Amino acid sequence: MRFNPKNTINIILLVASFAIVSLILLNTNSFFKKFKEEERLKMEIWAMAQSEFLSSPENIDLGNLHVTIFKNNTSSPMILVNKDDSIKTNNMSEELTKDPNYVYKKIAQFNSENTPISIDYKGEHIATLYYGNSEVLNKLKYYPIALLLIIFLFAAVIFFFFKTNKASEQNKLWAGMAKETAHQIGTPLSALLGWNELLKAENVNSAITKEISKDISRLETITERFSKIGSLPELKTHDIVAETKNAFDYLKSRSSNLIEFSFDSNIPSLPVKLNLPLYHWTIENLVKNGIDAMKGKGAIAIRIIPEGKHNVSILIEDTGQGIPKGNFQTVFNVGYTSKKRGWGLGLSLVKRIIEEYHKGKVKVLSSNKEGTIMQISLTANT
């Protein structure tokens, strides 16, 4: 197994991050418990002072100690229920405490947060003190959650940064491979051009040399497509109806007779900014996918219809086995394929060509067991 220093550093960083977060959570929890104990002690002192105050005769001066204890306790909300069921609140909204239902709900809440303190004097029960957590303690309680959320967001940012960086590297690799492929195709393509000219000179059947010329032209188009991957393609104004039909007719003449082809347009022509090699590639990809879905037998059609005042829709319909509704979006992901042999690049390239280069939209308009309709939407050059 090959040693990868980068993986080791990532593991060390992950373990260190986990250790730091664990220490922070443990310290926070310890501080929370300690702070809660101190509040409990403070409330017990307050309860003792209250016991002395309630049990002392009215004419006895208790001095400033009790008053100081009462005044200093301004953080924790308290409800004192006397033995005669009379209620006194402290550090709570006067308006809200006028509502008995609100007070009883608070008593239940305080009882769940802290154990009530019984105030007794010489064995006689005088009152019960219910108290809630102070504002500081409540904020401290949610601090670990906020900390975890911040760490999670920070980790998500780092994850997406590395993922995007990796995807960028892969894109550069694919672009480099595509350009190299285009370069490699150039040499045999030039030779084919020469051989075709020799065949013409030998007066070989013109129909044969004509078809060879078409295929050579096709290889030149493919070479141009590959050479444009990774660079921003140039868009020029073309007739969307004529160019769609050209791409469609090329496949029609080279497909099985078991497939019925049909083309229909609601508009005679419409100028749209296109990169012809990439747009033809898109149409051919969608038509080929339809043919594959039909397993070489069925009907495939292209319809061009206006969409509003400035847009046009190109609908590619087939009678194949259909796409599950849950996969309407995932079919455009890199690597998705229903074929035993395939890399799952076709539809992802279609999406990139239409949406990134031509600023249009492509989607699965509908699909069921009777067939699929793919839709391309583009803006007319008006």
Image (cartoon, rainbow, N blue to C red):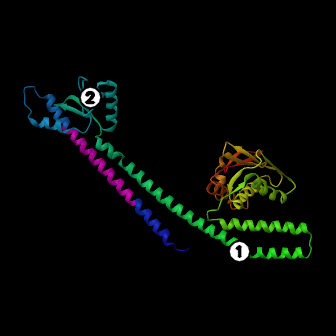
Q: Is residue 207 left or right of residue 244?
A: right
What's the mark number on residue 88?
none
Picture coordinates of residue 246, whole percent (x, y)? 78, 57
Q: Residue furthest front?
A: 382
Q: Which residue is mark 2?
A: 94
Q: Quadrant of residue 188?
A: bottom right
Picture coordinates of residue 302, whole percent (x, y)? 77, 49
Which residue is found at the position 61% from the left and 65% from the top? 231
CB-based contact (under 8 Å), mark 1 and mark 2: no
Q: Earlier in the sequence, mark 1 or mark 2?
A: 2
Instruction: Look at the numbered disc 1 and give the secondary structure of its residue.
Output: helix
Q: Is residue 23 above or below residue 34?
A: below
What's the residue type where badge 2 is placed?
Glu
Q: Is residue 104 above or below residue 315?
A: above
Instruction: Look at the numbered disc 2 and give the secondary structure of its residue.
Output: loop
Q: Main secondary structure of the magenta part?
A: helix
Picture coordinates of residue 335, whole percent (x, y)? 65, 59
Picture coordinates of residue 289, whole percent (x, y)? 75, 55
Quadrant (top left, top right, bottom left, bottom right) of the N terminus: bottom right
What's the residue type where badge 1 is placed?
Gln
Q: Which residue is mark 1?
A: 184
Magenta residue span: 19-45
Q: Is residue 287 above or below residue 82?
A: below
